[in-house]
Image (tube, rainbow, N blue to C red):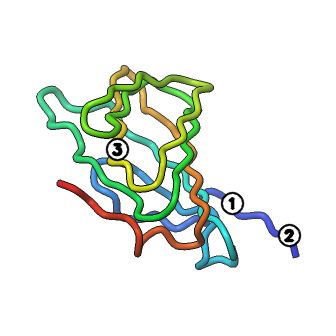
Amino acid sequence: MAKVVRLQDAPQIGLAGRDAREIVWGGNGSAQMTFRRVVIPVPEPGAAPRTQHLHRGFEECIHILSGTGVMRAGRGTLLPVGPGDTVLVPADEPHATSNTGSEPLVMLCFFPVPDIRPGTIELG
């Protein structure tokens, strides 16, 4: 049966340097996907960029709602991103998104699995 998940009811997950909420995932009934909202704040001056991570065996699709940033993909590709952009990250490709603007970077992230934790590897 269809249901509504309100953003304020979505669990906040402990990801360093950003506010991430798991809106849809296996823990609230999804059988085949995870849908997450991530807000990356404006970085403090001199802050180190976030380290890359990868998803073993599954893709990630990221849609930018607002703000500007850059995704470091693979071993050095830099992809500028802004509102309306969508990035498809292949399975097993290292990546990290950083805020390069003067306002929070707000993204929606989609994964084709109900729980990304077992397949996500932090590389830093």
Name the foreground residue: 66 vs 124. Answer: 124
The answer to which of marks 3 and 1 sits earlier in the sequence is 1
Q: Residue at x 35, y 30 (%)?
A: 99
**Image vertical order of residue 115 relative to residue 72, above or below:** below
Residue at image mark 1: 6
How far apart are the two marked residues, 2 and 1, measured between alpha carbons?
A: 13 Å
Name the foreground residue: 97 vs 8. Answer: 97
Q: Nearer the viewer, mark 3 or mark 1?
A: 3
How far apart are the two marked residues, 2 and 3, measured between alpha carbons?
A: 33 Å
Name the foreground residue: 106 vs 76. Answer: 76
Residue 124 x %, y %? 17, 54
- Please rate how many residues cluster around mark 2, counting C-alpha atoms within 10 Å: few if below 14, some from 14 to 19, many from 20: few
Q: Is residue 72 shown left or right of residue 59?
A: left
| Contact? badges 3 and 1 (CB < 8 Å) | no
Residue 84 x %, y %? 62, 26
Say what secondary structure mark 1 lies in.
loop
- Please name the amino acid that badge 3 sits on: His
Residue at image mark 3: 95
Residue at image mark 2: 2
Q: Nearer the viewer, mark 2 or mark 3?
A: 3
Please tell me the numbered disc located at residue 68: none
Q: Residue at x 32, y 34 (%)?
A: 72
Q: Residue at x 22, y 47 (%)?
A: 51
The N terminus lies in quadrant = bottom right
Say what secondary structure mark 3 lies in.
strand
- Please rate how many residues cluster around mark 3, counting C-alpha atoms within 10 Å: few if below 14, some from 14 to 19, many from 20: many
Q: Nearer the viewer, mark 2 or mark 1?
A: 2
